Image: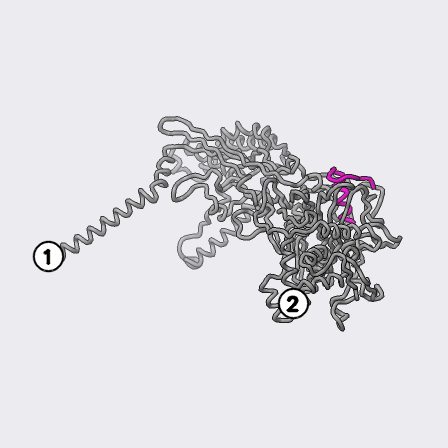
């Protein structure tokens, strides 16, 4: 029995020793660095020095976004309410009366003495308000309005919180039972409030001395302000170059709120938990400090380039360490963020954003659009334009309407319907319609199912004994149920004959056609520099095409032939973005060589398939057809049909142009039809079509230089709606000396 007790005692002592050993190991090995850091911190006074974000530049070095040093004046809540003077006067009165006398004095005696002591403290507050107002160029009334707004907001918040506290108190103690309810101050009643958020360095100097002497009421804090030099850019749009119904001899001045706002993105003044988790300022385990990590008052990129290149643009804070023991000071200077240079030309971007402005008229429903049965005249249409360098893949401009800068003027319904935060050229995928036909021809020739010299008859519809489906656009009552007859490749492209390309889709089959289109970028996501490296999925849209599994399902259902036929004209399970469309045409111009597009200088996505080599004869045949689209009277991009007669769509002179129009079936458009500010069930407009123009442009006697794409969502006819915008795109490129010509 005695020995058993000894053994039990030994085991208990051993367990205790083991626990102590393990705890010691944990404190020294696992958490040792953290504890050492805490101990060191007690011996040192640390001050973090602010950093600044890198600038965002255009391709020519123009600054699109930069940090500018600013200061903000923040005042304590008790100073705003006057309680600060009351508290100081009370302490002075108690000191003057003495502790014993104070305890014996009546409330009236105390109040009378406090009142005699308030003067210096009230004078200090008055001097502070006057100093702030003078530094910030504020009148007394303006200062009063700001203070009243803060008081009202905090008091309202306090009332809401106190009511919640009271209810919890009553739920715990019962009504009339337990201790009396005493409301606890909310955080806003113990914090400072920004009175002036945007002080220049010169203005801050005027407050510096006062803040140093009265740091308990006035906090003069460094703040960063993101400046956009191309803000409210004024662009002159020559209305004499517009289609006749909106043409005039005047120059219309368009104010672009913030050039490239959607591409640049925004900053948020709030650090989220996911930011800290991704890049903590202080590693809780090691105690190591990442000077580029996130602190509570940091700004964070929330969209666009500001978000995608957050880690590059973000700088590292500096550090001043003062040793309390020996009095030495060590200083590490802050490191500013690195600059990011875009491929965007700020001037081209600004001019294209101006062209897309609804007040110009090209992105509003007009009489010549011939879609007023579905949409009333003047309806504003979402639109996007992209221009890229064929040789390098660099994006010269990527404009859209509405833009992020327009969000402040939108109703909730408009915000929901139009999604202005989207970079539409890269994030809106739509059925291509007829703009895909040149690629279908390239696939058919590449697979040997059609010869370049082959004639194919347009019979008006593809399937025998089913004239109501898979019809050519000309096989309609409005055209007298006409057909195109026998056509070669060039004329089939120029006339955009559906029957011709139905036949190619049928011959190719869905699997081969889908594979070929994939090699041209359809259904392939390409990171152009807009996706943050920590995102699981790219922000750029991939578009869609039938994958292997879909093809097998359609084969089992007996639907493969119909799907391949429809895919031959860019309908069915096929969508792509304007950026993908422009890059596919650039790939055609390169004879099948793929070059990944990019919006950031020096950045290239590695996720790009190899292209399919194309013979120079094939490419030349396609391009001749594209030139005839706008150059021949029968081309679908040749002219507008107006009440006054025919008018060329492309009136620009001096440049070499090849383009394809496209009209594609669109899904229903949810719009606020009754104007009540909300999109309700049933508010859908159906039967609409998207409007496309995609093409190539170069000097009149030189090689192709740039590919472009225009998409007007729900616009209708490609030639009538997107065509005049494409004409303006080329004029802008001429104005900025990217291509030759300029006089029309």
C-alpha gap between disc 2 and disc 1: 89 Å
Q: Position of residue 233 (x, y in %)?
A: 71, 39
Q: Residues within 10 Å of mark 2 (few under 14, many from 20)?
A: many
Q: Is residue 111 left or right of residue 9?
A: right
Q: Residues within 10 Å of mark 1 (few under 14, many from 20)?
A: few
Residue for point 44% across, 57% down: 170
Q: Position of residue 100 (x, y in %)?
A: 36, 35
Residue annotated with mark 1: 2
Q: Is residue 408 visible?
A: no
Q: Is residue 477 left or right of residue 673?
A: right
Magenta-tinted stretch: 724-744
Residue 725 magenta-highlighted: yes
Q: Secondary structure at mark 1?
A: helix
What scheme was used to colour the molecule? one colour
Residue annotated with mark 2: 560
Residue farthest bottom in this picture: 465
Q: Position of residue 527 (x, y in %)?
A: 59, 48
Q: How many marks?
A: 2
Q: Is residue 124 left or right of residue 481?
A: left
Residue for point 81% across, 58% down: 370
Q: Quadrant where the C terminus lies?
A: top right
Q: Which quarter of the picture shows residue 45?
A: top left
Going from N to C along the chain, the mark reached first, 2 or 1, is 1
Q: Quadrant where the N terminus lies?
A: bottom left
């Amino acid at each position: 029995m005695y020995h058993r007790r000894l053994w039990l005692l030994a085991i208990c002592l051993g367990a205790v020793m083991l626990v102590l050993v393990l705890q010691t190991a944990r404190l020294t090995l696992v958490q040792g660095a953290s504890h050492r850091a805490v101990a060191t911190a007690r011996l040192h006074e640390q001050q973090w020095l602010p950093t600044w974000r890198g600038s965002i530049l255009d391709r020519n070095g123009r600054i699109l976004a930069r940090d500018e040093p600013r200061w903000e004046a923040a005042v304590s809540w008790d100073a705003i309410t006057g309680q600060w003077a009351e508290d100081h006067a009370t302490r002075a009165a108690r000191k003057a009366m003495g502790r014993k006398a104070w305890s014996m004095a009546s409330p009236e005696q105390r109040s009378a003495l406090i009142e005699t002591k308030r003067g210096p403290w009230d004078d200090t507050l008055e001097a502070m308000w006057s100093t702030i107002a003078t530094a910030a160029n504020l009148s007394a009334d303006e200062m009063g309005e700001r203070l009243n707004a803060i008081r009202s907001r905090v008091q309202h918040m306090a009332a809401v919180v106190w009511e919640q506290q009271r209810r919890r108190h009553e739920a715990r103690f019962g009504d009339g039972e337990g201790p009396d309810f005493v409301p606890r101050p909310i955080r806003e009643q113990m914090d400072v409030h920004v009175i002036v958020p945007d002080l220049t360095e010169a203005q801050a100097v005027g407050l510096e001395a006062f803040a140093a002497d009265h740091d308990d009421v006035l906090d003069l804090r460094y703040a960063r302000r993101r400046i956009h030099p191309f803000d409210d850019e004024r662009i002159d749009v020559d209305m004499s170059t517009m289609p006749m119904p909106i043409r005039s001899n005047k120059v219309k001045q368009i104010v672009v709120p913030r050039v490239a706002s959607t591409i640049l993105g925004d900053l948020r003044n709030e650090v989220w938990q996911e930011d800290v988790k991704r890049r903590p300022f202080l590693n809780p385990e090691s105690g190591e400090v990442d000077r580029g990590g996130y602190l509570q008052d940091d700004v964070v990129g929330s969209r666009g380039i500001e978000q995608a290149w957050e880690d590059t643009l973000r700088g590292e804070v500096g550090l001043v360490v003062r040793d309390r023991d020996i009095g030495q000071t060590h200083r590490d200077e802050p490191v500013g963020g690195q600059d990011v240079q875009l491929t965007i030309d700020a001037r081209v971007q600004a001019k294209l954003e101006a062209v897309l402005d609804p007040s110009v008229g090209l992105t509003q429903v007009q009489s010549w659009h011939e879609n007023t049965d579905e949409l009333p005249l003047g309806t504003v249409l979402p639109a996007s334009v992209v221009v890229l360098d064929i040789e390098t893949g660099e994006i010269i401009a990527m404009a859209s309407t509405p833009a992020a800068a327009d969000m402040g003027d939108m109703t909730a319904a408009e915000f929901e319907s139009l999604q202005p935060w989207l970079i539409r050229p890269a994030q809106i995928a739509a059925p291509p319609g007829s703009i895909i036909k040149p690629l279908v021809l390239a696939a058919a020739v590449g697979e040997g199912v059609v010869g370049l010299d082959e004639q194919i008859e347009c019979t008006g519809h593809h399937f025998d004994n089913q004239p109501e489906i898979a019809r050519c656009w000309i096989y309609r009552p409005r055209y007298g149920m006409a057909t195109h007859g026998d056509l070669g490749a060039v004329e089939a492209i120029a006339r955009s004959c559906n029957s011709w390309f139905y036949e190619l889709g049928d011959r190719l089959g869905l699997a081969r056609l889908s594979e070929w289109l994939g090699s041209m970028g359809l259904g392939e996501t390409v990171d152009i520099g807009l996706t943050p490296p920590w995102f699981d999925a790219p922000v750029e849209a991939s578009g869609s095409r039938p994958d292997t599994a879909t093809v097998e399902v359609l084969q089992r259902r007996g639907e493969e032939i119909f799907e391949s036929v429809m895919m031959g004209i860019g309908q069915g399970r096929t969508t792509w973005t304007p950026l993908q469309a422009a890059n596919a045409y650039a790939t055609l111009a390169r004879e099948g060589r793929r070059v990944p597009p990019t919006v950031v200088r020096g950045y290239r996505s590695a996720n790009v398939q190899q292209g399919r080599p194309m013979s120079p004869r094939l490419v030349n045949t396609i391009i001749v057809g594209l030139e005839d689209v706008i150059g021949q009277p029968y081309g679908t991009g040749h002219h507008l049909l107006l009440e006054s007669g025919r008018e060329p769509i492309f009136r620009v002179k001096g440049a070499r142009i090849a383009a394809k129009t496209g009209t594609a079936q669109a899904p229903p458009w949810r719009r606020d039809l009754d104007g009540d500010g909300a999109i309700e069930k049933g508010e859908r407009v159906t039967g609409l079509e998207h409007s496309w123009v995609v093409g190539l442009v170069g000097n009149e006697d030189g090689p192709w230089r740039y590919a472009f794409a225009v998409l007007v969502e729900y616009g209708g006819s490609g030639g009538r709606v997107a065509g005049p915008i494409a004409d303006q795109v080329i004029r802008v490129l001429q104005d900025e000396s990217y291509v030759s010509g300029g006089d029309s």
